[in-house]
Image: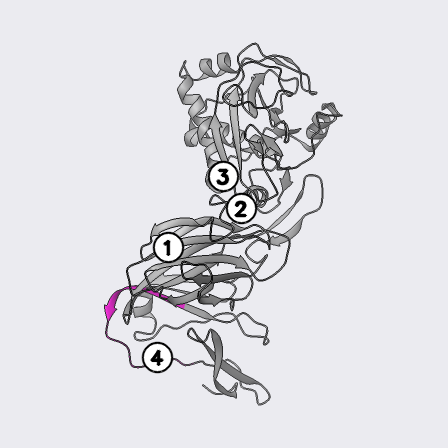
Amino acid sequence: MSVLFKPGTTELEKQAAILKLSSGSDFEPVDRWVTTHGGNTGAWGNPASISYSYVPDGTFVPNSGLGSGPSSLFARMNALFGGNTALWQSKFDASFNRWGDLTGLLYTHVNDDGAGLHGAPGVGTTRGDVRIAMITMTDSNVIAYNFFPDIGDMVMNRSFNFANPLNDYRFMRNTIMHEHGHGFGLDHMMSNNSAQLMEPILQTSIDGPQNDDIQGGQYTYGDWLENNDNNAGRTDLGNISNGQEVLNLAVERPSDQDWLKVNVSAGVAITITATPVGALYNEGPQGGGQQPRDSRAINNLRISAYEPDGTTLLGTSDTGATGQPEVLANIVPSNGEARIKIDVSTTANDIQRYRLTFNLTASGETVVPTSFEMFRGIVLSGGVAELQTSNNAYLSMSPEPVFSNSEYPIQLIVRSTTSIHTPSQLRFSVESFVNTGNLNRKLELFNVVTQAYEQIDLQGASQT
């Protein structure tokens, strides 16, 4: 069982509240659901279906260290919301569904028969896997508490005003989303330089699950497109458009594969970009030490494209460094249909979040730039105005210095939508900021056809 504290709660007050909590079977291990109303949920990373219900008023809430008594959820919430039951229940729906938008969890609201709390499993439409109740708690610092799987029940403190409408009832929604994070298996975490939903004190400067929270949910139940671990179980994205993005995806462990089906007009070339998602932040368990974590650079993304049979390879890309976007350029499926596989080529037993971008080009076309991205460790972005005003005729870029052969490559991606005549040449210069006789500068360009870097120049660092 885990509790959520109101803002301003001191460390001493938190420890005092934790000492009151009951020991024994009420303390469930942090884990994923094994069995819900739909049966066994399978292995880590598999999706799961969870039902939830509101216990009838009068259902007894056992003492778990913060008081006991009959639940008064309906009476209290209806009083706070002026009798509008549908309104307060819609905020519960939105809170559960937000986790469903990000993870492989599917939620259903069902009735509740008033069976004993914390011991009756979910049964069809009779009662939920997760059951929600409310009592007046003996500790005024505790907003709510929640049991870990396979109980998952949520108990809220009647003493708080959950009807504050600020930011679409964010106080209430963040409370629900935090507590249900425990309800499907997440423990508290702490960060001294970022705001996360699963911190032990309620955060209202954010709205719902953040980077660390999403990693936890997706590592446990996969992303929102699961189960698409092979060509047979692929996710059908249908007819894709130029610039289309698919967000909140993850390869949650090295054995995971994400398979997608896409369709384009015959002869159209597809360029696929898989961009790592995340941030550099400090994180650690409640009460423990914190360490830096760069969730953009956990595992190295890899893209493969196939004909519909899932075996005839159209192309693959695994050239970008860990933490950098991976680009598979100019794939042309024979009949306009391709199967895309995203996985990782490294073996950290951890999650790599990412987003996909699709860019389309008719066969033989070249395009005028509408936007660009330049990155080497960080991403800079801009539009045509920046291209036109960078030294009038040229795009000038000054990334961080190159210190060794192991530096990230500088990559420039130019996106476009309008056709122009094929350019006859690409001109660029690389200037050195040092003048030394014992240092060489090597220039390589990436060949998208051969999927390899090719050396085109090698000279002293004092030359342009």
Q: Amino acid at mark 4?
A: Leu
Q: The N terminus is located in which quarter?
A: top right
Residue displayed at 47% across by 57% down:
341
Q: Nearer the viewer, mark 4 or mark 3?
A: 4
Q: Position of residue 124 (x, y in %)?
A: 52, 23
* Residue 33 in view of the camera: yes
Looking at the image, residue 295 lies above or below residue 100: below
Disc 4/disc 3 C-alpha distance (Å): 45 Å
Residue situated in front as seen by the camera: 25 or 395: 25
What residue sits right under mark 4 in the picture? 426
Q: Secondary structure at mark 2?
A: helix
What residue sits right under mark 3 in the picture? 206
Q: Nearer the viewer, mark 2 or mark 1?
A: 1
Q: The C terminus is located in which quarter?
A: bottom left
Tell me if mark 3 has few (under 14), some (14-19) or many (20+) residues whose alpha carbon lies within 10 angstroms of its own.
Answer: few
Residue displayed at 52% across by 85% down:
461
Residue 211, numbered label: 2
Disc 4/disc 1 C-alpha distance (Å): 32 Å
Q: Quadrant of residue 46?
A: top right
Q: Nearer the viewer, mark 4 or mark 1?
A: 1
The range drawn in magenta is 413-429
- Identify the mark nearer the N-term, 2 or 1: 2
What residue sits right under mark 1 in the picture? 262
Tell me if mark 2 has few (under 14), some (14-19) or many (20+) residues whose alpha carbon lies within 10 angstroms of its own.
Answer: some
- Identify the mark nearer the N-term, 2 or 4: 2
Q: Secondary structure at mark 3?
A: loop
